[in-house]
């Protein structure tokens, strides 16, 4: 956990800092940029970000942990988001959620032992008229069924 | 060359629209037919997505829902000439779901290509902004006031009053902030607008900027909407290079720019002051009011905050006049609302209609009943913080005041349908659970009340002294309702109490026990 950031990553965070240091309210855009580039926000980047943004480490830590979207650990190879909000519940998303947990072998905000899948609950993807909705990596799936979900996961799981 | 249209809206993509486009090209190549596939916005008839439209001399003819596997048979049926097919829907404009609507804000939806400046201008775009540029700022604000436009995000506060307040302030920097943190289940009209008609929102924000003297606008878009973020960013760049934004908006000598801010998955940031904190780079914690954001908002400066649909309704008001807009609707609910019919419904989609129609019309005339074919049991109107409306109230007109009178909210017009397999006690518990998960933690009724609420609902199910537990839950809801800083804690009691009042059996209670407690 506490191993120092590898130098290319450190360099990258420093570069991104220069893009956002003078931007009003630049912390969120910066954190997004770091996560876009690295897949997560490493703990060891926090002091660097704090210093660069003229904030305390506690403030940066507070922001990272407040928002569900920011991750402090690397995600699995594929991120599976299952919507659990009302419109999806009305069409069987809770059954889908249970299936996802058993199929992927991990719970909410966890990554499967083989590192292939991370499972995230999500509260609304804006596909409420074609629920239940699932997002796997960048791809949206409407009217998801248990059979369709198994097929998509099997295809991704078998790929190297 | 035959022109086809396949939407690029997220809901069409999620249904496989890109695969359909690939298949169309493959089969056309094989047959040696020249086709031009345009990616338009969605009509909002989502049960028909992917909807493929063919431009014929009679107009656009629709087929849907088309899967990649259907494409071969469509070609065989001669769909390029409007041929008959099991998926044929006839002329798109005559599909009853669409023909029965009153599309003002969504007039271009499904017709134009989202990022085409030419399409936007050819379908009435920029007329409102041009009119606003030629007017005195106070006159623009007066138009918005006269239109009766109320906040479409849920709170229904008159937009013109916010604008007038900001116009009346003196400050070196004012802001326009668009709340596009559409986190409520059952809503997608903001997403459709940003993905499908982004210039309409840009035009509305620019008008707001000119009217109140703001030079910078922010659009705060949820991270769950990557397509909307990408479309808005591109649209802003294109609008700026065409002179609709920038240092000299349409030659007015006034500056207005827009920046997109990506949210990060906190539901409560849809509350306006939490959103301001988030844009400022902080945790999205609710601010106490006063001061009003109109006086001390973003970075402490006067700020107009409106929802996407509110701002997107402004161009047509400025183009056709306040009177035109005000003629739609009823009472103090003027204009139209894009209702979103979602959940367990056969024909889910977007229905823009003037206020005043009934839920029953939306559920059956448009929605076609439940998707499962089972009886509809409960309908949640206005998002996760809205009440569950039982069948006895489905004929009440959808009007802000009429709904408030029965302890419900019209809100943003999001409607989630549940069939008779829904357990209302578990949905009530979920409302509390969601509040506990998403509470910003600043005020006690919301932070602690939500967890205690979950526990109490559990005990109603298991404890011997049910009536006392019901009493406790009502008391707790009363505290949350009156003691919370914002709508998160303040409105979570709506779904909870409506479930309890209208569906006592699901809590293991006799109707009598509920009313006496």
Image (cartoon, rainbow, N blue to C red):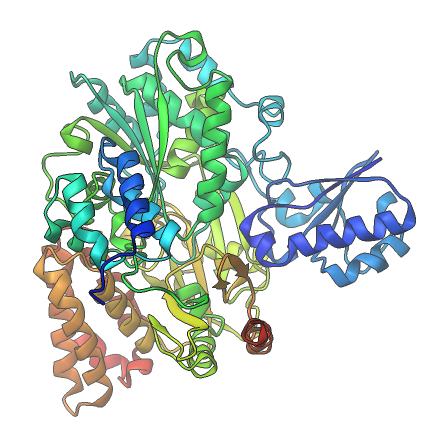
Relative to B246, say whether B370 is above or below: below
Where residue B1 sits, quadrant-wise, is top right
| B35 relative position to B65: left or right | right
Residue that appears at 17% across and 90% down: B463
Q: How many labels does the image show?
A: 0
Viewer-proximal residue among B439 and A55: A55
Residue that appears at 27% across and 35% down: A18
Where residue B294 sits, quadrant-wise, is top left
Relative to B92, say whether B365 is above or below: below
Residue that appears at 76% across and 54% down: B23
Inspect this view and state whether residue B263 appears: no
| B106 relative position to B169: left or right | right
Viewer-proximal residue among B152 and B109: B109
Q: In which quarter of the image is the C terminus of chain B?
A: bottom left
Relative to B460, say whether A6 is above or below: above
Residue that appears at 34% across and 50% down: A8
Image location (x, y in percent) of residue B409: 32, 52
Inspect this view and state whether residue B235 appears: yes
Where residue A149 sits, quadrant-wise, is bottom right
Image location (x, y in percent) of residue B349: 55, 53
Image location (x, y in percent) of residue B511: 27, 80
Residue extending furthest bottom? B464
Viewer-proximal residue among B260 and B415: B260
Image location (x, y in percent) of residue B202: 43, 28
């Amino acid at each position: 956990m506490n191993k120092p950031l590898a130098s290319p990553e450190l360099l990258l965070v420093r570069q991104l800092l220069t893009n956002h240091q003078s931007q009003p309210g630049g912390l969120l855009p910066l954190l997004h940029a770091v996560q876009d580039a690295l897949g997560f926000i490493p703990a060891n980047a926090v002091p660097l970000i704090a210093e660069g943004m003229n904030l305390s480490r506690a403030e940066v830590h507070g922001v990272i942990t407040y928002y569900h979207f920011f991750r402090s650990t690397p995600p699995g190879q594929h991120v599976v988001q299952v919507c659990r909000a009302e419109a999806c519940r009305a069409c069987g998303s809770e059954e889908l959620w249970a299936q996802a947990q058993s199929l992927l072998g991990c719970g909410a905000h966890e990554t499967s032992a083989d590192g292939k899948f991370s499972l995230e609950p999500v509260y609304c993807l804006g596909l409420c008229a074609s629920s239940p909705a699932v997002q796997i990596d960048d791809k949206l799936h409407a009217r998801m069924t248990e059979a369709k979900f198994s097929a998509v996961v099997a295809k991704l799981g078998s790929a190297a | 060359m035959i022109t086809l249209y396949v939407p690029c809206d997220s809901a069409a993509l999620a249904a496989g629209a890109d695969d359909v486009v690939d298949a169309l090209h493959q089969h056309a190549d094989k047959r040696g037919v020249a086709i031009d596939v345009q990616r338009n916005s969605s009509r909002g008839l989502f049960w028909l997505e992917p909807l493929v439209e063919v431009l014929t001399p009679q107009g656009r003819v629709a087929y849907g829902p088309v899967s990649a596997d259907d494409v071969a048979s469509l070609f065989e049926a001669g769909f390029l000439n409007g041929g008959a097919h099991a998926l044929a829907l006839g002329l798109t404009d005559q599909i009853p779901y669409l023909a029965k609507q009153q599309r003002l804000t969504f007039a271009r939806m499904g017709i134009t290509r989202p990022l085409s400046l030419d399409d936007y201008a050819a379908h009435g775009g920029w007329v409102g902004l041009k009119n606003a540029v030629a007017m005195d700022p106070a006159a623009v604000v007066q138009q918005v006031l006269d239109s009766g436009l109320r906040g479409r995000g849920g709170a229904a506060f008159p937009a013109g009053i916010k604008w007038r307040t900001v116009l009346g302030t003196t400050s070196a920097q004012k802001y326009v902030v668009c709340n596009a943190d559409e986190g409520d289940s059952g809503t997608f009209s903001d997403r459709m607008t940003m993905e499908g008609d982004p210039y309409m929102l840009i035009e509305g924000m620019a008008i707001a900027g000119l009217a109140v003297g703001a030079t910078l606008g922010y659009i705060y878009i949820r991270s769950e909407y990557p397509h909307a973020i990408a479309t808005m960013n591109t649209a802003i760049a294109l609008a700026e290079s065409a002179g609709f934004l920038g240092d000299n908006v349409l030659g007015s000598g006034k500056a207005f720019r827009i920046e997109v801010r990506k949210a990060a998955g906190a539901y409560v940031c849809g509350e306006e002051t939490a959103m301001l904190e988030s844009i400022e780079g902080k945790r999205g914690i609710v601010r106490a009011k006063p001061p009003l954001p109109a006086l001390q908002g973003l970075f402490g400066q006067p700020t107009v905050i409106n929802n996407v649909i509110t701002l997107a309704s402004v161009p047509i008001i400025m183009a056709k006049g306040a009177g035109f807009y005000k003629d739609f609707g009823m009472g103090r609910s003027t204009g139209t609302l894009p209702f979103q019919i979602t959940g367990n419904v056969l024909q889910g989609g977007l229905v823009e209609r003037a206020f005043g129609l009934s839920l029953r019309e939306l559920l059956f005339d448009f929605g076609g009943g439940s998707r499962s074919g089972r009886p509809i049991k409960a309908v949640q109107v206005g998002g996760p913080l809205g009440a569950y409306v039982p069948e006895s109230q489905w004929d009440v007109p959808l009007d802000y005041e009429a709904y408030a009178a029965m302890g419900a909210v019209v809100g943003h017009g999001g409607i989630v349908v549940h069939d008779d397999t829904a357990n209302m006690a578990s949905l009530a518990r979920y409302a509390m659970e969601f509040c506990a998960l998403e509470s910003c933690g600043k005020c006690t009724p919301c932070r602690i009340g939500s967890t205690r609420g979950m526990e109490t609902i559990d005990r109603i199910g298991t404890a011997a002294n049910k009536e006392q537990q019901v009493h406790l839950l009502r008391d707790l809801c009363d505290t949350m309702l009156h003691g919370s800083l914002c709508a998160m804690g303040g409105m979570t009691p709506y779904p909870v109490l409506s479930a309890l009042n209208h569906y006592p059996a699901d809590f293991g209670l006799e109707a009598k026990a509920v009313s006496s407690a």
